[in-house]
Amino acid sequence: MSILIYAILSLTVMALIFGAILGYAAKRFKVEGNPIVDQINELLPQTQCGQCGHPGCKPYAEAIANQTDPINRCPPGGEATIKALADLLDVEVLPLDAEAGVDSIRKIAYIREDECIGCTKCIQACPVDAILGAAKLMHTVIVDECTGCDLCVEPCPVDCIDMLPIEVTKQSWHWHKPDNLIATDRQPNLTVTGEDAA
Amino acid sequence: MIQLYNFPGGIHPPENKELSNPGQLITLPLPEELIIPLGQHIGAPSEAVVKKGDQVSKGQLIAKAIGSRSADLHAPTSGVIADISDQQVAHASGLKETCITLQVDGKDTWHADITPADPEQLSDEEVRQRMAAGGIIGMGGAGFPSNAKLATDKPIHTLLLNGVECEPYISADDTIMQVDTDGIVKGTRLLMRLLGQVKCIIAIEDNKPKAIATMQAATADDTAIEVVVIPTKYPSGGEKQLIQNLTGKQVPKGGIPADLGILCVNVATVNAIHDAVYLGRPSIDRITTVTGKGVNKPGNYRVLVGTKVDFILDQCEIDASANKVVLGGPMMGFQLPSIQVPLVKTSNCLLVPGIDEFPAADTAMACIRCGQCEVVCPAQLLPQELYWLAKSDAFDKIEQYNLMDCIECGACAYVCPSQIPLVQHYRYAKGVIRHKAQEAKQAEHAKLRFEAREQRLIDEKNAKEERRKARAAAAAAAQAAKRANQADGDDPIAAAKARVAAKQQAAKAQATDSNPEPAAEPSHKELKTAAAIARTKLKKAQKAFADAAATDHPDTDKLQATVNELTQRSAAAAEALVKFESQLGVDPEAIKAAQVEWAKANAKVRKLTKLAPEDDATDAVHKEYQQTLAAAEQDLQQAESHLQSLKNPTEESS
């Protein structure tokens, strides 16, 4: 009988000790925020374009983490981002939601400077502060900072903003995928990235 | 004699170096036009300092370096700047780049500032300046600006001169070692001095006996310089392979030779350094091997930077059957997109294969996992695994297999029995990985900027709120201060009320004390006023009564009573006035008529006064005027006395 009591007592004491340790650890090493949101945010292209219906990439990451939004609403990220998100979250790869927009090549905004009237509307619209200018003075886009989000085009009252594809330079060019795959591998519409050398 | 350690892998392709007669240097005639690309080196392209139409002489600066990892460009010969525009350059992409087009005038006159100097008399800093002014970049192929390479802050104990030239067909370094021996040795001593008396190893492959003999003879008396002969094996000339061969140590992953205390420089670069420091001549030409069975006059040519490939091929008599031109050697070179492109400082070989020399690659066959690629890989990678991963776009995984350590030597593809273009796959994967890394960097940057902006907007909003609160607090404080003053008795409203009250009090006192007479016996004027006031009051009351009656106001009866009372008062006032007037014996009508008379006379006098004649008028006119005025004044006096008599009969009588 006493053995039974000792066993119960010792187990109770152990349970209390471990409970205390766990409780302390839960407080001491509490993770601030939702780590999955940051991981999702890392995968998003940070264009901050809002095509997903959220004001920026982070809010969309939060929506994905809360499972209120599907992973296929990011046109700038395209298929690659959807695939990466599917890998991370262990869900099915979905085709890009056409409602959000279409996957297109990356573009950069350019202001036709002699047509700019200096209204500052595009400056306020730019999510990454990539437009430089002042009221009634010409504005210009800091090309290196532009994410190509398109948000400045709509507010412009004189339609002087062009979205132009990024030009491939000697520095940014890279070799395309060899298309002379082995005979048994030949596929009809093989996607080839990069410029053709010839 | 130092011990050699060999390096893993490697192949022995047919050398074909004799084809280009190593040691025989031919200087090409001046072309008519030179095209000098601004981005010949690694790093930011230079910036043109000349403009269209400028006359330049040989060796004159035409584009200056931007930043520390860049190099100056100089006019390779004298002439006129014909254009600065985007032109196709010698790059596998076939893309365009900004180039300076120089119309050669054929005089080939050196710029006046090009002066020789004795480095013994120069300080280290001056030597470096002369070197930097020479616009020298690594001429072995990579194009790394030499000044930036020398500016390393890591301790260097060995200067390694690379004269290995392991790639088949090429003999440009072999030739320069035989032709410009003196320049190479002097340049080497200069570098050793700048690096702080280090030892020097000149590495040459054993397939260049003449170059070895020449270099050994030139450095026999210098114990600090050692010519090391290494066995021929491709790619023994690769920087990392050469260092492993000589020291047995590997350059750390992602590191540079300076991490091991070694500085590796190509022999042609050292010669260019000599030219820049001793002669003041910038890097404007180089030795290029033109070879292959597709040219009738293969050899080593001294070509000016910017010489177009088609000009060189014309001079070397290109064979009609040749169907492609490769820039670089057969292992690492690439097919030129066009022969209209210029050669640059790093172009060491133009290879024009004959029709049967490099037959077009057969269709790649399936990988049979023979493992030969793994055997020959000098970087000890797993080419077969890398191939599978590159083919399936598994970029994360391929990085774990150290793809980035691949030197793209092509040994694996060379030995592949299935003729799989392995290096192309690696180049593609490397390109995508670099592109992704760049995109990730940009995304991170954009994220930071976006977050900074959000924070700024929040801060602005908070600051606005703060300001609003501060304003509200200030207003509240002002109110409180006001109330406090009021409590002290300084309230202006109260003060004003007090003043008014005091005034009324005083007026009342005056009325009762000092002036009881007028109240008892009102004057004519007062009576008149009282009558008028009574009339006005009555009118107002009547109107109010009418309004009230119309709207059925409950106070209608009250108003009726007021109207009645006022009617009586008004009548009384009027009666009092009439009574007073009759007592006085004044006829209001007569007074009125007299007033009109008086006003007329007054107006006449005034008019006349205004119409006074000018000073220069005749005496007659003056006289007439005086008379008229006097008459008018008399009329006025009469009218006035008449009026007075009518108004105050009592006063007159009394």
Image (cartoon, rainbow, N blue to C red):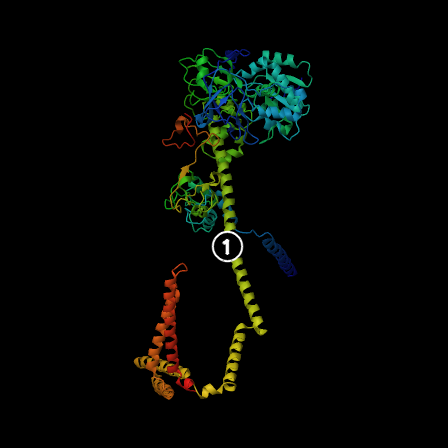
Subunit under mark 1: B
Q: Position of residue A128 (x, y in %)?
A: 48, 45
Residue at the front extreme, as displayed: B620
Where is the N terminus of chain B found, in terms of image quarters? top right
Circle 1 residue: B461
**Where B565 sits versus B23, above or below?**
below
Residue at 56% x, 30% y is B69
Could you say where residue B112 lies in the image, as x and y percent from the top left?
56, 20
Please tell me in which quadrant of the rendered image residue B522 appears.
Answer: bottom left
* Residue B229, percent from left and from top: 62, 16
Judged from the image, the secondary structure of the residue bearing numbered disc 1 is helix
Q: Amino acid at mark 1?
A: Lys
Position above or below: B623 against B118: below
Q: Nearer the viewer, residue A55 or B482?
A: B482
Instruction: Measuring from the top left, give residue B455's x and y in whole percent.
Output: 52, 50
Q: Quadrant of residue B245?
A: top right
**Quadrant occupied by the C terminus of chain B:** bottom left
Frontmost residue, B141 versus A175? B141
Name the residue located 36 percent from the left edge and 66 percent from the top edge. B624
